[in-house]
Image (tube, rainbow, N blue to C red):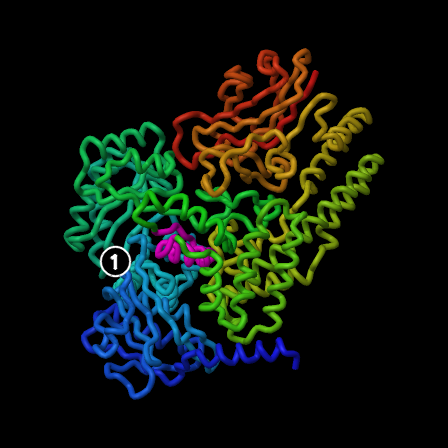
Amino acid sequence: MPAHRKLLAVLLTTLTAQALDLRHAAIVAPAGLTGPEQKAAVLLSDEIARRTRIRLPVTTEWPSGPAIFTGRDVPARFAARLMAPAAGPEGYRVQTVDGNILVVGNDARGTLYGAGALLRHLRMDRDTLEAPDDLRLASAPKYSLRGHQLGYRPKTNSYDGWTVAMWEQYMRDLIVFGANAVELIPPRSDDAADSPHFSLPPMQMMIEMSRLADSYGLDVWIWYPAMDPDYSDPKTVDFALKEWAEVFRQLPRIDAVFVPGGDPGHTQPKYLMALLEKQTESLHRYHPRAQMWMSPQSFDKAWEDEFLATLRDRQPAWLSGVVFGPQVRMNLPELRQAVPARYPIRHYPDITHSRAAQFPVPDWDVAYAVTEARETINPRPVDEAAIFRATAPYTIGFLTYSEGCNDDLNKAVWSALGWNPGASVEEIVREYARYFIGGRSADTFAEGLMALERDWRGPLADNAGVDATLGLFQSLERSATPAERLNWRFQQALYRAYYDAYTRKRLIYETGLEDAAMAALRDSDMPRAEAILDRAVTERTAPELRARIFELAEALFQSIHMQLSVPRYQAISVDRGANLDTVDAPLNNRVWLKARFAAIREAPDEKARTAGIQQILHWTDPGPGGFYDDLGNLKAQPHLVRGAPYEKDPAFRESPLVGFAGNASWRSSWWTHAESLYDAPLKLHYEGMDPKAAYRVRVVYGGDSPRVRIRLDAGEGLMVHPLMAKPTPIRPVEFPIPRQAYEKGTLDLTWRREEGLGGSGRGCQVSEVWLLQQ
């Protein structure tokens, strides 16, 4: 054996010798521990057994062999050797001393989080349980609120199929990464009353989830939308007080109630706040220390001003704090400055949606948007860390907005960063992989999760990393144990890798088909062009990848009740994560082109038919001296004025973003658009204009907000057109450009939506722009 290999073998033997063998250890939980501390011992025993087949006994007495101690009062013989604690509530120390492991909490919760930290650092495999013999951890959380919304309701993409046992397991999983709160949803919300997947009626499950959270010492919040149409009516108020009180009465634990100002609900602040004052009195009859929080979500500027004036002028004592979530007009720093200091701010970040969301995926390819869609499996560790670090300093912490287990890794990232904002994202993902998948393949699995996020960056056709990521996961799949193959987190990653790779192959294939069809059309052979386009359906590419996607969808339904299809698994709708139903959505202009071909055939004469063909072939050509932008195409936005980098503006409040809307019958350039949010402008800048020439602008107003009016200015406030409704059906429209706007050879075009609106902030949405020199 070469010398360097001998040295490596010695080093590995030494490292192995330094591992503490815990196969025969016992867990010491002294008598008199509180509920959460008792749960710490049970958590350790159960989760170790789940991963190793080794069941460590839990005892109140110190065993003759190695021990894992859990509690606050460490045995005297170890006290002098225990490291100094990290100050603060929920903190812990985890330390190896004389072949034992001490898990010592600053308080009851701290013991539970210490157990979670130990689980993340153990080496657990089949019949193997080891810990580093130099383990020394002392930590306390930075943020006091670290939680996630767990909605047992039909709208979610998996949660409505969960049992009480599944909810307990998931709460444990969240605890291990540092979560200290959950947010429940009442039986009546913006959702169907029932689901075919419910294992219990909604109220009964809500009671069970509150009980479970209380048993682990977790805070219980309720997201409680005010759904009734008119709270200025005393009868409506009386009904709401009775309805909510019945929920409050039945829950074993409530720490806080959060009422969104909108999305859903739509009530003027003065009436909503009057209702919530009465609801707070009702809440305190059953839970005297529970808090009431609200958000200004969906408020327009007038309602936002009214809300803030009430806080400043009256400072209502019943209100405990303000929530910043999706559809708040102000950004978070502005809200913190506007809200009186007595009211803390909690974040309600959307970690579950990939588009049409508070924090959409940056530079997402339209092929992903129309297939994987809004609620796909979305590990985004780097993005979520950027969002957290840009927003957390203005808050006391967070409870995230989630619609299912599709965002599972994102929950772990938020929990871990809420504990330690300086934590390495890569290390969080490695700990996630080590704990949930196992040490044997943890590093490779973590690498794959990071790669899945990178695979969503930029133009898909150019991203060969997608195929490399699939290869990585296929290698894991080939060597996976039966337990790993049944692991829903493993299945989710495989599903995404296969889906991404299939979508890329289809995109390249269907783009090639369209190119070939256009070549046939240039020869005036429309039948041949149409036949080529139809091969996307009659001669599918990569059928083996498609088949595996369907197999994994079935596996996920069986393992975690994930509903990836409406007809197969009774998902509530396609846009709620059922992307198996869009796996073959067109990725080129086939549907639009075939409709144009049909129209051309009906043209009155050959001249009109030729003109129709030429319009298709030269669609993006602005002519001599002209300019063209396909504003939703990342490779065709040369004149778009960019904003701040993603790390500084992950919500795109000051920066343009690519949005998605429409359907397959539209031209593909209309499926996407550049947009700005709320009152921010959308700008294009041109150089090389001819001051002596006349120009017209041709524009296509796409998007998902047809009722929001839009205006266009040129140069320094020269109106091109006033506020106008977007044309329906969607089509190009043209306007002259004032010569004064480009008299110096440059031109700025600026779009704005109606000012002061509430809601999603969307509406200033532009798909295509031609600048045509006359």
In front: 571, or 701?
701
Residue placed under numbered mark 1 in the picture: 88
Q: Quadrant of the N terminus?
A: bottom right
Residue 52 appears at what percent x and percent y?
44, 79
Q: Would residue 501 be seen by someone viewing this image from the given angle?
A: yes
Judge whether residue 194 can be spotted in this image. no
| Quadrant including the C terminus | top right
Residue 236 quadrant? top left
Please give left or right for residue 529 compared with residue 652 in the image: right
Please provide the residue range marked out in magenta: 399-421
Q: Assign a secondary structure to mark 1.
A: loop
Q: Which residue is pictured at 31% across the width and 62% down the height?
A: 209
Q: Which residue is painted at 38% across and 34% down in the image? A: 329
Pinpoint residue 362: horizontal percent, then vertical percent. 53, 43
Point out the residue furthest to the right here. Answer: 523
Q: Nearer the viewer, residue 162 or 120?
A: 120
SS majority, magenta: helix
Q: Is residue 412 magenta?
A: yes
Q: What residue is at 67 percent from the left and 25 percent from the top?
A: 627
